[in-house]
Amino acid sequence: MKGVFIGLGSNLADPITQIKLAIKAVDSLDDVLLITQSSLYASPPMGPQDQPDYINAVIEIDTCLFAHTLLDKLQEIELEQGRVRHRHWGERTIDLDLLLYGENQLDDERLHVPHPGIAMRSFVLHPLAEIASDLTIPTMGNIQQLLVDCPLDGLQRID
Ligand code: ROI
């Protein structure tokens, strides 16, 4: 299935390298094909301000994995790259968020898809719009319309 989008974020341990490593790890998963990756973006932290800026990106994959199986694999990659939870909304080595799973809406204790933060987080919405400019997001609508109400908030494309 196409239209599966993953958001990546890091602000520890050489964030650019962390993002590139994670993209490679996702691409190397069985039953996953990397379709597109956005540019890398630098963004000021949302949450506590006494933490480093983040590097963010969004990728689209094609996969036949169930959403929860994919989530398991993403969490394995986070662990392999040494993700440790320091504090709520705090710094992290790598974060892999399942943003969209095609047209599907999923709501349980592990998954909220579409990811509820998409429309409010410039570091998610703008990279997503870069690679899917005519996307319609279930329950949220047209991405160009969402961009109008989502200022950059210091987001900068870095490559
Ligand atoms: N802030 C930015 N800029 N980028 C992120 O990826 C990010 N991820 C998070 C929180 C802590 C909410 N803040 C973030 O999980």
Image (spheres, rainbow, N blue to C red):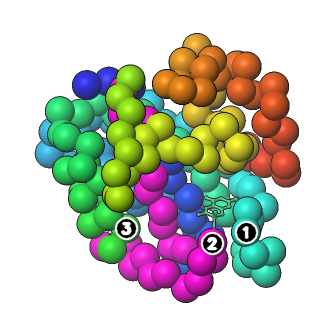
Task: Characterize the local packing of mark 2: few (<14), some (14-19) or many (20 or more) Cα atoms within 10 angstroms.
Answer: few
Assess whether residue 143 is covered by the magenta stretch: no
- Is residue 26 shown above or below 151? below
**Which of the two discs, 3 and 2, labels the residue nearer the N terminus?**
3
Q: Is residue 5 left or right of residue 67?
A: right
Query: Residue 150, which numbered label?
Result: none
Residue type beneath disc 1: Gly
Front residue of 153/130: it is: 153
Label 1 near ligand 1 (CB < 8 Å): yes
Ligand 1 shows up in which quadrant of the image? bottom right
Q: Residue at x 48, y 62 (%)?
A: 95
Q: Secondary structure at mark 1?
A: loop
Residue type beneath disc 3: Glu
Does the image show residue 4? no
Q: Which residue is mark 3?
A: 78
Q: Which residue is mark 1?
A: 47
Q: Position of residue 15 (x, y in %)?
A: 58, 66
